[in-house]
Image (cartoon, rainbow, N blue to C red):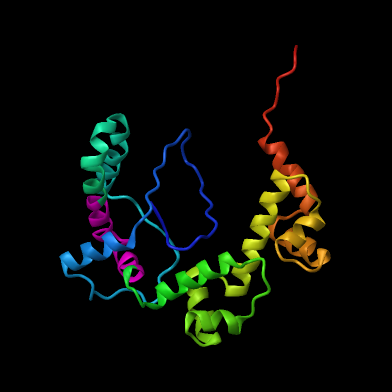
Amino acid sequence: MLLTTIDLPVTAALEQVPYRSASLHLDGEPLTELLLELDETGQSAPSVPAAQVAAPMPPELADAVSRWVELLDTPEDIRPLAARIETEILYRLLRSSLGPVLRQWSLADSTATRVREVARWIRARFTEPLGIDEIAAVAHMSPAGLHRHFKAATGMSPLRYQKHLRLQEARRRLLASDASAAQIAQAVGYVSPTQFNREYRAAYGLPPVQDAARLRARLTPTVPTGP
């Protein structure tokens, strides 16, 4: 199972295909209510937990998730049972190795929560020129403190996170539109096409146009030819 608290890239190695997966958006309010009911809001947790944490899924949690997904087979049961099973899933998650991370992210004014809000703020403005002082003011931290906590959670600095968002969006647009690389570079916030090409190649291994061609070739089904 993978818990993602900030929008970051995810890479998975599949050991068996085909495979099935289920995704559940965790609402902070039910999680906090459950913590209050369990009287666990004061338990210790890492000051800045990683934004992505993977762990084996315990059998009892796998059972709850399976029952949650199987509600799709009986739509009339979704309304009376879905919320109850989701509460059980939250409970099982809190009892799993992901529990400390969930507790920290549920706190309203924790450092982890401020890092998450800053990441959300950057994502909404990633095409704009941003400075570390401006971002730190949003987080109510010093620039050095923000850099330390943000990197501890995401593995990158706030400005590098912004660059990642720009390059990710640029790659999506290159694949989905007919715009030129220079036009896309400008659209995602780059002033210099040369800088865009350099940073894109460093991130994805090829210049923008060549990378887009490679991706299209991978996604285009091969039509078998005759004998």
Quadrant where the C terminus sits is top right
Q: Is residue 46 visible?
A: yes
Q: Viewed as shown, does residue 58 lie left or right of 117?
A: left
Q: Where's residue 225, x and y in %?
A: 74, 17
Vertical order, 216 against 207 (above or below) = above
Q: Where's residue 181, x and y in %?
A: 80, 54
Residue sitting nearer the eye, 227 or 51:
51
Residue 76 quadrant: top left
Residue 72 quadrant: top left
Q: Report the magenta residues as a range.
A: 87-105
Q: Is residue 127 magenta?
A: no
Q: In the image, what residue occupies the spot 28% across and 56% down?
A: 93
Q: Is residue 157 visible?
A: no
Vertical order, 46 against 180 (above or below) = below
Q: In the image, what residue occupies the spot 29% across and 44% down?
A: 65
Q: In the image, what residue occupies the spot 23% across and 59% down?
A: 95
Question: Which secondary structure type mostly characterizes the magenta part of the structure?
Answer: helix
